[in-house]
């Protein structure tokens, strides 16, 4: 649409957008508000908008016994996070290899998540959170590495078998998870892998890899073939050319794909519910808190909902562009 | 690229696809012909087409099918229309100010479906803001009966998935050159005519694709039903996927559940196959 010039029209546009966005974010805002109340305040009629906030629901969600010096520990947690991000950025500026940066971040977070239960008494929500991080990160790493190899080959190879692989991937990408859940369950009992990270990561990779394959292929197709050919003329093997030359060029595409795979793994409910008894990820764990009736017994589930959503908010904050790019190219090309 | 290198590069992907998608699907087909529960996992009985027969004669299955299609028919057009309008409006405002609107849309879209459904439900619980507003307006107590829960499911669908339509349509609009619209305007087309004759034809393939993605997602709707009905059968609000879940997890008729998955996959294929054929043609033409 050509730009609207008249001021009244512009006012109406802003007004409509604001109304739409407010309605869309209302459930989030209301949940945040409720999570900061105690049960009596939460049930007050008319609803309270101004009240003295309490963080009880959050502390009882995360801790078995609430540590006395919580504010300082929180501050320490934030500082450690910032330190990790700053050092990763510093490495990126010095042109350290992407792999080294990823390894640094992974190892530091591994240590951090290991250290926290040693310092404070955490509740089981913390364990579910760690489960989710392990499963999501594992899925992303495996799915993205496997499908960047595959996606690259599919972008450069002209044979009919390539097209066949792509069509099969496209077909399986859209099938309902339920069709696989029960065979996976059977498979897990046969192999004795029930309730393990390996099983969860494996099946999530299986589900999301076709999508990643399509997306990475479309990104590789945008890169001219001459780039790796030049490297190969200089004596590099195709694999070396792929790792040294193409991966750095492709990095934005890999990030976009990785983000969408991460979302898929983080969102998965049905499969995790069927395949685990105790190693729940957050979407399954949260159903334990929220109950099934249209009333609240306490305000902890509101806090749980907020805590599950915050990592995603951070993701949107940092990676908005890549997410939009990934979503739209995933839809258009895939 | 030589055939040998190609095989080396795609081998991991192909192995994963065969082991984790194709074999499980074959297993599901085989299990669909058997009768067993969690206790008799290893003592399955071959029953032929009995599972399929029992599904097709199951009135609750057909109820689930009807409700799923009701959701598709009502929610998809609403999402597409609201999403396209918001995307057109978003296209109107300067780049610097779009960020906040796009972020908020994106937040809704990336939120975990289970949690999003819970947050949405939170508005309509006994302590919810929505409940209070409805009670003030109608002067009656809001009772979560079958009708109310079904309305909530429809509203949830529109709320959660419209942002997806917005983001994709908005991205599509960026590829529309203003020159066409200028030309139309010079020829005397008013704004609605410009949208009708320039913008919509330009976006038509994209809109079709979005509609297909949205419909396929609705066809597989499960998470929201789990949260909004608590899987309580009194609401009669099972979708196909929810009833499939009920058959597997609550009724423990695993053979029948597998058969139902296969039927669902078959149903999906009706939509998918023309699309696959088209993709196949375009892929093989490039080569």
Image: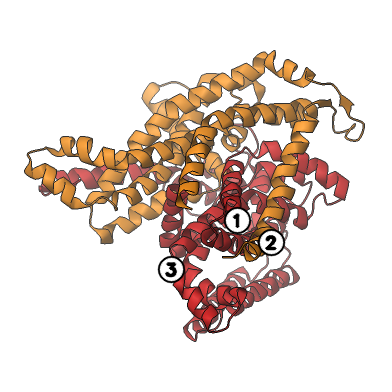
Chain colours: A red, B orange
Instruction: Name the residue tied to disc 2.
Output: A134
Question: Is B39 left or right of B63, judged from the image as shown?
Answer: right
Answer yes or no: are tags 1 and 2 on the same subunit: yes
Residue B130 sits in quarter: top left
Whether residue A43 appears in this view of the structure is no
Instruction: Name the residue tied to disc 3.
Output: A224
Residue A107 place in picture, x, y as percent = 67, 75
Identify which residue, A224 or A131, lies in the foreground: A224
Between marks 1 and 3 in the image, the one whose residue lies nearer the viewer: 3
Residue A246 place in picture, x, y as percent = 52, 72
Gap in angstroms between the C-alphas marked 1 and 3: 51 Å
Answer yes or no: are tags 3 and 2 on the same subunit: yes
Chain letter, disc 2 residue? A
Going from N to C along the chain, the mark reached first, 3 or 2, is 2
Q: Identify the element where label 1 is drawn.
A: helix
Whether residue B245 appears in this view of the structure is yes
Q: Is residue A264 depicted above or below B233 in this figure?
A: below
Instruction: Name the residue tied to disc 1.
Output: A58
Chain letter, disc 3 residue? A
Cβ–Cβ under 8 Å for marks 1 and 2: no
Figure quadrant of the N terminus of chain A: top left
Q: Is residue B148 depicted above or below B170 in this figure?
A: above
């Amino acid at each position: 649409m050509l730009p609207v010039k008249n001021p009244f029209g512009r006012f109406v546009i802003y007004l409509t957008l604001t109304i739409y966005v407010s309605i869309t974010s209302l459930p989030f805002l209301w949940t945040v508000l409720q999570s900061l109340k105690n049960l009596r305040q939460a049930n007050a009629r008319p609803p309270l908008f101004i009240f003295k906030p309490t963080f009880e629901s959050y502390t009882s969600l995360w801790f078995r016994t609430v540590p006395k010096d919580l504010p300082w520990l929180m501050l320490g947690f934030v500082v450690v996070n910032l330190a990790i991000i700053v050092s990763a950025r510093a490495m990126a500026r010095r042109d350290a290899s992407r792999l080294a940066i990823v390894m640094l971040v992974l190892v530091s977070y591994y240590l951090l998540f290991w250290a926290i239960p040693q310092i404070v008494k955490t509740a089981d929500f913390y364990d579910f959170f760690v489960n989710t991080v392990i499963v999501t990160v594992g899925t992303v790493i495996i799915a993205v590495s496997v499908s960047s190899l595959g996606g690259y080959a599919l972008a450069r190879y002209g044979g009919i078998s390539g097209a066949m692989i792509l069509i099969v991937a496209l077909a399986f990408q859209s099938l309902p998870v339920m069709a696989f859940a029960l065979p996976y369950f059977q498979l897990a009992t046969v192999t004795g892998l029930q309730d393990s990270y390996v099983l969860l990561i494996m099946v999530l990779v299986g589900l999301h890899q076709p999508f990643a394959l399509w997306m990475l292929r479309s990104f590789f197709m945008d890169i001219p073939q001459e780039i790796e050919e030049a490297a190969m003329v200089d004596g590099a093997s195709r694999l070396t050319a792929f790792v040294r030359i193409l991966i750095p060029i492709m990095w934005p595409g890999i990030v976009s794909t990785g983000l969408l795979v991460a979302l898929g793994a983080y969102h998965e409910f049905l499969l995790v519910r069927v395949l685990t008894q105790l190693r729940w990820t957050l979407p399954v764990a949260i159903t334990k808190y929220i109950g099934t009736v249209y009333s609240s017994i306490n305000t902890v589930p509101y806090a749980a909902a907020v805590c599950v959503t915050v990592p995603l908010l951070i993701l949107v904050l940092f990676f908005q562009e890549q997410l939009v790019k990934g979503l739209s190219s995933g839809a258009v090309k895939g | 690229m030589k055939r040998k290198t190609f095989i080396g590069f795609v081998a991991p992907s192909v192995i994963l696809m065969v082991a984790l998608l194709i074999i499980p699907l074959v297993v599901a087909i085989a299990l669909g012909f058997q009768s067993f529960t969690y206790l008799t996992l290893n003592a399955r009985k071959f029953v032929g087409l009995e599972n399929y027969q029992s599904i097709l004669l199951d009135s609750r299955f057909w109820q689930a099918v009807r409700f799923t299609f009701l959701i598709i028919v009502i929610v998809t057009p609403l999402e597409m229309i609201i999403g396209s309008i918001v995307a057109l409006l978003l296209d109107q405002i300067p780049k610097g100010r779009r960020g906040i609107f796009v972020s908020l849309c994106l937040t809704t879209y990336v939120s975990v479906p289970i949690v999003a459904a819970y947050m949405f439900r939170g508005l309509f619980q006994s302590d919810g803001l929505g409940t209070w507003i409805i009670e003030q307006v109608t002067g009656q107590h809001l009772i979560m009966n079958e009708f109310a829960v079904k309305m909530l499911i429809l509203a949830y669908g529109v709320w959660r998935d419209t942002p997806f339509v917005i983001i994709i349509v908005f991205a599509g609009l960026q590829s529309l050159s203003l020159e066409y619209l200028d030309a139309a305007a010079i020829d005397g087309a008013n704004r609605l005519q410009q949208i009708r004759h320039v913008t919509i034809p330009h976006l038509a393939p994209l809109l079709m694709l979005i509609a297909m993605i949205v419909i396929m997602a609705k066809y597989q709707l499960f998470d929201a039903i789990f949260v909004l009905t608590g899987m309580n059968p009194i609401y009669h609000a099972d979708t196909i996927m929810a009833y499939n879940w009920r058959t597997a997890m609550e009724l423990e008729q695993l053979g029948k559940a597998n058969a139902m998955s296969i039927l669902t996959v078959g149903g999906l294929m009706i939509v998918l196959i023309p699309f696959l054929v088209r993709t196949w043609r375009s892929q093989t033409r490039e080569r």
